[in-house]
């Protein structure tokens, strides 16, 4: 996968590029976000102890000229750090959206954490959704980006005419 080409295509659009990263998989994620002054929020509500803070999922804005964005693009897809997505909405609005999706309930009303930011989960979940479920899950997200199962390309997920549309970012290696 040509990371420069992927980055060009991710930042080509006029929408904002965000990520939801898994603190369990990204070493020192809260520290990296704070030290890099990256606009971000924790997806989990309330006060967290240190262990929970380092294991929590975080949503962050990826600026095209930031070192953090370079690190995310170069590692997130191959190491399944999380998901990237385009949206016109603000970071705060997107946090509200993803926070609302974080807890799901089984048939008996028992709560579970929905790890939608795990690329393997998202890859299996989205094709099972009907039009209404896709609309709810996507909210104001235009396109989701995740690393392919083999880590060699970037898969894309969007909605068109109420249905899921999948694709890949073209790898233009010479």
Image (spheres, grey):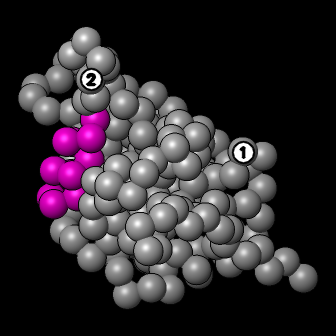
Q: Left or right: 106 with respect to 84?
A: left
Q: Quadrant of residue 149?
A: top right
Does residue 90 lie above or below 39 as drawn?
below
> Looking at this view, is 130 or 125 the one in front?
130
The percent position of residue 78, horizontal first and vertical second, equals 68, 48
Q: Residue at x 52, y 75 (%)?
A: 10
How packed mark 1 is, by other alpha carbons closer than 10 Å (few <14, some 14-19, many 20 or more), is some
- Residue ID for mark 2: 105
Quarter of the rendering occupied by the N terminus: bottom right
Q: SS of the residue at dot 2?
A: strand
Between label 2 and label 1, give the one nearer the viewer. 2
Q: Residue at x 39, y 58 (%)?
A: 131
The segment highlighted magenta reads: 92-102
> Looking at this view, is 40 or 67 the one in front?
40
Residue 31 seen in the figure: no
Q: Residue furthest right?
A: 174
- Residue ID for mark 1: 149
Q: Quadrant of residue 169?
A: bottom right
The percent position of residue 41, horizontal first and vertical second, equals 21, 48
Quarter of the rendering occupied by the C terminus: bottom right
């Amino acid at each position: 996968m040509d990371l420069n080409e992927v980055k060009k295509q991710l930042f080509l659009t006029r929408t904002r590029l965000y990520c939801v990263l898994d603190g369990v998989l990204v070493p020192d994620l809260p520290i990296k976000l704070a030290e890099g002054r990256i606009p971000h929020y924790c997806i989990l509500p309330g006060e967290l102890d240190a262990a929970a803070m380092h294991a929590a999922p975080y949503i962050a804005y990826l600026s095209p000229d930031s070192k953090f964005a370079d690190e995310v693009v170069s590692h997130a897809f191959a190491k399944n750090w999380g998901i990237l997505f385009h949206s016109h909405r603000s970071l705060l609005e997107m946090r509200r959206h993803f926070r609302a999706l974080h807890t799901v309930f089984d048939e008996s009303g028992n709560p579970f954490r929905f790890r939608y930011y795990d690329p393997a989960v998202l890859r299996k979940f989205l094709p099972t959704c009907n039009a209404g479920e896709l609309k709810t899950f996507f909210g104001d997200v235009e396109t989701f980006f995740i690393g392919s199962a083999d880590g060699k390309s970037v898969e894309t997920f969007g909605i068109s005419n109420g249905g899921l549309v999948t694709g890949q970012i073209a790898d233009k290696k010479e």
